[in-house]
Amino acid sequence: MDVILNQMDEFAPVAGPVAGLVMKNEPVVIKRRVARQLGHLEALESEAIHIMREVAAECANPALLFSGGKDSIVLLRLAEKAFRPGRFPFPLMHVDTGHNFPEVIEFRDRRVKQLGERLIVASMEDSIKQGRVVLRSENQSRNPFQSVTLLDAIAEHGFDACIGGARRDEEKARAKERIFSFRDEFGQWDPKNQRPELWDLYNARVHPGENIRVFPISNWTELDVWEYISREGLEVPHIYFAHRRDVIRRGSGLLPISHLVQPKEGEKVENLMVRFRTVGDMSCTCPVESAAVGIGEIIAETAVTRITERGATRMDDQTSEASMELRKREGYF
Amino acid sequence: MSAIENISFDHSELLRFITAGSVDDGKSTLIGRLLHDSKSIFEDQLSAITHTSRKRGMEAVDLSLLTDGLQAEREQGITIDVAYRYFATPKRKFIIADTPGHEQYTRNMVTGASTANLAIILIDARKGVLTQSRRHAYLASLVGIPHLVVAVNKMDLVNYSQDVFERICQEFHRFVAGLNLKNIAYIPMSALNGDMVVERGNNLGWYEGMTLMDLLEKVPVDHDINLEDFRFPVQLVCRPQTEEWHDFRGYMGRIESGSINVGDEVQVLPSALTSRIKEIVTYEGNVEGAVAPQSVTLTIEDHLDISRGDMLVKISQLPQVTKEFDAMLCWLSEQSLDPRRKYLIKHSTRLVKAVISRIEYRLDINTLKHEAADILKMNDIARVSLKVHQPLVWDAYQRNHATGSFIVIDEVTNNTVAAGMICPSKGQG
C-alpha cells in the first residue's frame, strides 16, 4: 500500500487550474504532492460530482438551474468536471424575474456561450403577461413568485429533476432538506414526509408529474464556495466585489438604488463601497459595506463575518421566521 | 478565529459526526455550546434566539433554540428526522447530523450515522447508562461508526464527582464489550456551563484527557475508508462521439475504496472480463494514479461491454458476486415489510429486483435478544436472507461500507423503505 501511495504523491492531480481550461487530447500530467487524505474541498467536490452523475444516470430529463450567482457558477464547474469531455446531459435553465442585475444577465449569457451548452430562460414577464402571476405593484419583489414560473417551466419541458445550488448552511429549512428532495405533482416540499437518505445511495425515482430537486452542494458553506471559486479561478459577476454604489438604508439593510428602488421621503442616498453576498431580485437584495476588491479579501471577510448570508442580504427572508420554509412548500427551489 | 492570518481552511480535513441522545440529555445545549464556543454562531442567529429566550421568560440565552425546528415542527410538536449543521475551526471542517431522540430513534440514527466518522453518545450523569444509551451504542456498532465518544454530561448536577464519572464509564465499558466498537473515548462535561466542551473550565481539574473539541479536531479519520480493495462502480459511460474525441470511451465513477494506477490489471464484474487501465482522466488532465474517494473517468486497453452498474476491481482483491446473501435490515417505512412482495434494491450503482426470502430473526434492540418474526415494522432491525434477480457485486459491510450497503425501494410508492448492511457469507467469518 505504501508504495502505491508514494507514487500517488508524485502524480496526484493538482488543484487550481486556470479558468476556462479546456482539455486537450494529449495527456497533461501535473505533478504536485498531496496528502493521502483528501482536503475538505476535494472531498466536497468529489461528493458533488458523484451526485451530478447519479442525476444524469437515473433521471430521464433533468435540468440545471443557473442564475449567474456564485453557487450556480460553482455548479457549472462541477458539471464540467463530472461530464467532460462529453457534453452536459441536461440544459441549463434560468428563472428570470426581470428584476435581475444587468451585470449578472450579461455574465450569464457570456458563461453559457463559453461552455457551449444550451440555456432555457423561463421568464416571469411571460407569466405576468399570461396572468399566471399577478403583482400588486410593478416594483414589488418578485422572489415569491419565482415558484410559479419555475413550476410552469418544469411542466412545459417535462423535467423530472432540477439541479440547484442551494446549501444547507443558508437557512434552517434548507438544513433539514435532502440532497435528492422529492416534490409532489404540485411542486410542494413536505418536510415531514421526506425520503430517508442513507450513505451515498440516492433515490431519484418519481411518478410522472412529480420531480426531484437535487442539491449537489448541500454540504458546502458560503466560505467553501468562495474558497472553491478561488481555487478554480472562476469568474463571477463583478458586483460580488467591492464597488461604489448609491444606496439607501432601509430596515436593517442597505438597498441599491435602481429603477425599482427610489428613495422615499426622508431617506438619504449615500454613495458607499459595497459588495453583494448574494445576487437576486434587485428590489430586495441588499449589499454589505465592504472594501473587499479581490477574492482573497472576500474569503478573509467571509471567514470572520458575524452575520449569516441571508440575514445580511435578503429582505424577503426577514419578513417571518418561516418565510423560506413557506416558499419551499409552494415549490420554491 | 479573530485574526485573519489564522484562517487558512484550505487543506483542512472533513469530519462528519452524529449526536445521539434525547433532549433531556442536553444534546441541543451541547451542539449550541460547540457552535457558540467555537464562534460559529452568527450575530443575527444569536439575536434571534436571545429574543425568543426573553419572550419565553428565560434569563440566560437558551442555546438549544439554535437547533429549534421548522414551523411545521413547532405547530405539531414533532421533530423532523435529520438536520445538518456546519462549523469549522482552523484544523477541520465539521458536519453535524443532528437527529432528534424520540420513538423513531432507530430510523433517524441509522440515517444520520450512515455517513458519520464519529458518534457522540450523551449520558446524563445523574441517570447513568440507560436502556437508550445501550440502544445508541448498538446502533453505532451496527452502522460501523469508526469512533465513539461517550459524553457524560450534566456533571455540574453531580458536583463534578470523579466517582460518578468512573462508575458510568465502567458500566458502559462492560456493556459494549460484546459490540463491534473499537475507539471509545469518555469525557466528563457540563454543556450548560461549557466545561470540557471547547474550554476546559475550572470544575473538572481531575480529568486529564482531551476536551470534546480537542478530540474532534485530532481524531484520525484517514483510515475510515477501506484503502486496500479497489472498487469502482461505473456510474456513466462517456462517449462524446465528437471529432476530437471520436474513439473515446470513458467509464465515469467514484473510487469507493482503494486506489488505482495506470497499467493496473482490472476485472469487470459481474462479467469477469479483464483488461488494463489505459488512462485516468480528470478535468485537470490525465493522472497516473487516483485514490478513494476521488471521482474520475477511466479508460481501459480493450473494448469490453461495460455499462452502469458494473464494477471495476483489481484481480488480487475480488469481492463476492452472488444472487443470494444475508443482511442486517433496518426497516424505515410506516408500511411494514410484506414478504410476499418484490422490492427494488439500490446497491452501489445497480438497481435490481429482490425478494426478502427469510427473516432469520428480529433483534430486540433493548436486550439484543433474537426473536422470531413474520413481518418487519418501522424501526425494526432484523437479519434477513435476500434473493436478487441479477447478481450483485458486494463485500461484507464491516469490510467495506460502500459495497456492503444498500437501500430498499418500494416499487409502487417509490419510497425508500429500508436500509441494508450485507453480512459476511457463511463460513467467511
Image: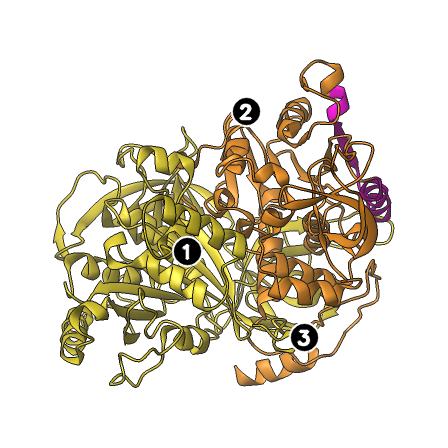
Instruction: Check residue A208 in the rendering and tell me which mark sits there, or answer none.
Output: 2
Q: Chain of mark 1?
A: B
**Disc 2 chain ID:** A
- Residue B395 visible in the displayed image: no
Q: Is B210 located above or below residue A281 in the figure?
A: below
The first of marks 2 and 3 along the sequence is 3
Amino acid on which disc 3 is placed: Ala
- To which residue does mark 3 refer? A12
State the CA–CA distance, disc 1 to disc 2.
Answer: 32 Å
Give the residue at mark 1: B97
**Do labels 1 and 2 touch, CB within 8 Å?**
no
Whether the magenta-drawn stretch holds residue B261 is answered as: no
Q: Which residue is at a point 70% across and 71% down the rendered structure image?
A: A13
Q: Which chain is orange?
A: A
Where's residue A4, x and y in %? 58, 81
Element type at mark 1: strand
Label 3 to label 1, Cα distance in Å?
31 Å
Question: Could you tell me which quadrant the C terminus of chain A lies in?
Answer: top right
Q: Main secondary structure of the magenta part?
A: helix
Which contiguous range is marked in magenta?
A102-126
Residue A166: give x, y in percent of width and height. Answer: 60, 45
Q: Nearer the viewer, residue B94 or B110?
A: B94
Q: Secondary structure at mark 2?
A: loop
Are circles 2 and 3 on residues that touch, CB within 8 Å? no
> What residue sits 45% from the left and 63% below the top?
B35
Which residue corresponds to the image point at 67% horizontal and 16% vertical from the top-left? Answer: A132
Dot 1 alpha-carbon crowd within 10 angstroms: few under 14, some 14 to 19, many 20 or more: many
Horizontal and vertical percent position of residue B43: 53, 56
Which residue type does callout 1 highlight? Ala
